[in-house]
């Protein structure tokens, strides 16, 4: 029986991870459960899974939760997420929190040699060099949950390989894939949240609409698979049926296909190297889909993807700034304080103003992350 620590249990990935755990009660038990502030969503999950440890975002949420449940171990904040990641009984940590807040817990889990299923891509974007260094040092395999990275991981057969010609990451195009840039003026939050293929949390859905999600995924792939940026390609693929591909040096291309359902990569990360039945997901019906489309990615149409490639190639602290500015700008957009097109504007300004720091350590990353958010907020207000 594997003891699971799930960070971000009330989110889109978190809830689907619990769907997978329900299928395999003889193999997985939920030891720890972390979430932010959504007590209403968490309560039935706490009652059902009865975790030994609960972590919430802050003291206020802890107090509210204590009025609802009597539980011996309710922790809070970043320290709580770390405790839930390193607790002795935990075998596998699923990091499904949103944002760079997930970084310290990921690093500590790796240092404690926990098996790591990672959905929290912002961790790898903001500090990929630190995460991979620790993973190598402690011989921890990072099992990707993100659908594209799970696809690449499977196309590589789980190996680190040097005979790759290129990675081909597919992008659905997001909510505005059929709009011109001119047509993006005045789009609403609801328009942006209307993803054509996936039902996901709000932040990643906005990232998908701006193409920043693909930019973050390029940086995530660079670190996870140790592939240079010039060998990472992105193509538009409207159907989200091919989740990504690897072209080897001999021109063989291995693609992974599947129904767009995150329970598939979540379960694979949990059961790897085994494959288990997943009856709650539909089989891929290619006859029904009939046609798969591919289109060249236009970096002028999607400047967030261009900025991500540039920040990734520049390295050092640039991806930290890219990620923090994006997290802040997306939050401000979701709160109705800036327009959709302002997101890319504030990210560009943050990158421009930042003097790159080579090889930043954890405390430098945390302070750059904080300063960048403050700078974006200051410019907006
Ligand atoms: N959704 C998807 O299909 C995919 C998501 N991912 C990645 O997975 C991660 C999670 O995404 P998604 O599930 O969509 O996001 P959601 O916004 O749906 O969920 C985020 C989760 O993190 C919790 N959380 C947020 N802030 C904190 C905090 N400070 N402390 C503790 N918990 C916190 C939330 O708690 P609460 O709501 O209770 O406040 C919630 O449980 C992201 O990095 C995303 O990029 C990758 C591929 C696909
Ligand atoms: C499901 C998943 O992995 C998301 O990251 C997804 O890729 C979003 O789709 P697009 O960014 O391609 O629109
Ligand atoms: Mn993805």
Image: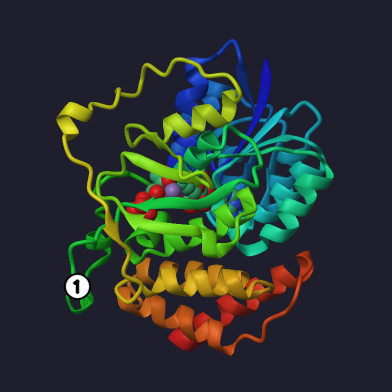
User: In the picture, which quadrant includes the C terminus?
Assistant: bottom left
142 left or right of 233 in image: right
- Give the x, y percent position of residue 354: 62, 85
Look at the numbered disc 1 and say if its residue's Cβ is closer than 8 Å to ligand 2.
Answer: no
- Give the x, y percent position of residue 220: 56, 55
Q: Is residue 141 above or below residue 285?
A: below
Q: Quadrant of residue 359?
A: bottom right
Q: Quadrant of residue 297?
A: bottom left
- Give the x, y percent position of residue 147: 45, 41
What is the residue that sits farthest to the top in this orientation? 26
Give the residue displayed 49% in from the left and 51% down from the top: 167
Secondary structure of the residue carrying tag 1 is loop
Give the residue displayed 67% in from the left and 15% down from the top: 1
- Residue assigned mark 1: 180
The mark total stands at 1
358 left or right of 208 in image: right
Viewer-proximal residue among 43 and 257: 257
Viewer-proximal residue among 135 and 333: 135
Q: Is residue 170 above or below residue 356?
A: above
Residue 339 in view here = no
Give the residue displayed 67% in from the left and 74% down from the top: 317
Give the residue displayed 22% in from the left and 74% down from the top: 184
């Amino acid at each position: 029986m594997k003891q699971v620590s799930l960070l971000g249990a009330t989110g889109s990935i978190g809830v689907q991870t619990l769907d997978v755990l329900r299928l395999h009660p003889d193999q997985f038990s939920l030891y720890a459960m972390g979430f932010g502030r959504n007590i209403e969503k968490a309560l039935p999950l706490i009652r059902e899974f009865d975790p030994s440890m609960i972590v919430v975002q802050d003291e206020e949420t802890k107090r509210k939760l204590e009025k609802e449940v009597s539980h011996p171990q309710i922790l809070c904040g970043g320290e709580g997420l770390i405790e839930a990641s390193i607790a002795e009984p935990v075998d596998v940590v699923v990091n499904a929190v949103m944002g760079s807040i997930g970084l310290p817990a990921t690093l500590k889990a790796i240092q404690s040699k926990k098996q790591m299923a990672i959905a929290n891509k912002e961790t790898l974007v903001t500090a990929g060099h630190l995460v991979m260094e620790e993973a190598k040092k402690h011989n921890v395999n990072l099992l990707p949950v993100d659908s594209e990275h799970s696809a690449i991981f499977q196309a590589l057969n789980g190996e680190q390989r040097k005979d790759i010609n290129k990675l081909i990451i597919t992008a659905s195009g997001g909510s505005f894939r059929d709009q011109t840039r001119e047509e993006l003026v005045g789009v609403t939050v609801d328009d942006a949240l209307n993803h054509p293929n996936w039902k996901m949390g709000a932040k990643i859905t906005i990232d998908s609409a701006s193409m920043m999600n693909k930019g973050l995924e390029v940086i995530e792939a660079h670190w996870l698979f140790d592939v240079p940026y010039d060998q990472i390609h992105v193509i538009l693929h409207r159907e989200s049926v091919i989740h990504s591909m690897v072209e080897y040096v001999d021109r063989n291309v291995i693609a992974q296909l599947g129904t767009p359902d995150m329970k598939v990569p979540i379960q694979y990360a949990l059961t790897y190297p085994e494959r288990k039945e997943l009856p709650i997901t539909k089989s891929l019906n290619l006859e029904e889909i009939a046609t798969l489309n591919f289109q060249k990615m236009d970096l002028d149409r999607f400047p967030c993807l261009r900025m991500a490639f540039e920040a990734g190639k520049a390295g050092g602290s640039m991806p930290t700034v890219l990620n923090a500015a994006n997290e802040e700008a997306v939050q401000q957009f979701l709160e109705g304080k800036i327009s959709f097109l302002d997101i890319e504007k504030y990210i560009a300004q943050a990158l421009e103003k930042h003097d790159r720091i080579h090889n930043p350590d954890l405390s430098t990353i945390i302070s750059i992350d904080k300063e960048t958010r403050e700078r974006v907020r200051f410019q907006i207000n």
